[in-house]
Image (cartoon, grey):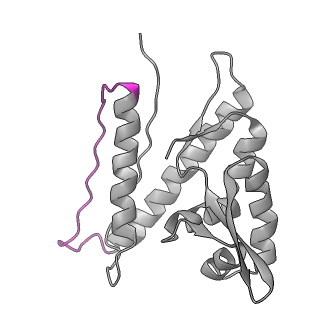
Amino acid sequence: MQPYFVKTEEEFNTIYHSYRMKIITAFSKCDTQTATFKQIGDMLGDHSSKVTYHGKMLIKIGLLSLDHTENIHGITAKYYRLVSENFRVQYGKDGDHVVKKKIMKHQATIVLDSLDEMIELVGDLNNDNRSIQMASNDLYLTEEERIELIEVINRFAQKKEKRANAKKVTCYSLIIDHKNEK
């Protein structure tokens, strides 16, 4: 699946809205990779009208597309598919500084949320059976290798998050800061 390139502030605001991120995550967890807004609403515990409202915004920017329709008891059910689960922000050398600043703030929020989740998972710091591992590395990759790394990590995470009867024992955050160096 090719990455979706976020190019405008409108696209950024549409995708990185907290509820729309939940919709995107729900679509990515569907076994068939397609779902109706009603099915997504059921997964999220919300009415389909709320999902439809936000889903139409994702359709407008091209992140969701109609996969197929089915006639179910005389009602046409529309099944949608994510165009991509990976988002990349694209801006030129003189790119939109408002978008750049929003992206950095959003990344900081993700890191802080991950830290809160990690603290909850670690729980009692006196428990000798728990540990925290942190690493920071510089990798020198071609563009193709960078894309491959992201795909490998996403496939690994998807396999582990869909396991039945498994207990969540760890959390991870990965932020890839991509810059072209000459």
Task: Give the quadrant of the C terminus.
Answer: top left
86 lies above or below 181: below
In the image, is 113 to the left or to the right of 42?
Answer: left
Q: Position of residue 167 (x, y in %)?
A: 33, 79
Q: Where is residue 62? Give x, y as percent.
A: 71, 47
Q: Residue at x 79, y 50 (%)?
A: 60
Majority SS type along the magenta span: loop
Residue lying furthest top in this view? 182
Q: Can residue 171 be seen?
A: no
Res 170 seen here = yes
User: Would you say 164 lies left or right of 58 here?
Assistant: left
Q: Nearer the viewer, residue 41 or 105?
A: 41
The residue positioned 40% from the left and 43% from the top of the image is 150
Left-right relation of 162 to 16: left
Front position in the image: 109 or 27 = 27
Quadrant in which residue 39 is drawn: bottom right
Residue 133: quadrant of the picture:
bottom left
- In this picture, which residue range is highlighted in magenta? 124-143
Report if residue 137 lies within the magenta region. Answer: yes
| Number of callouts | 0
Residue 92, above or below 145: above
Residue 64 percent location from the top left of the image: 68, 55
Identify the residue at horizontal 74%, vertical 35% (top origin). 8
Q: Residue at x 71, y 78 (%)?
A: 38
- Residue at the far left in the pictured view: 128
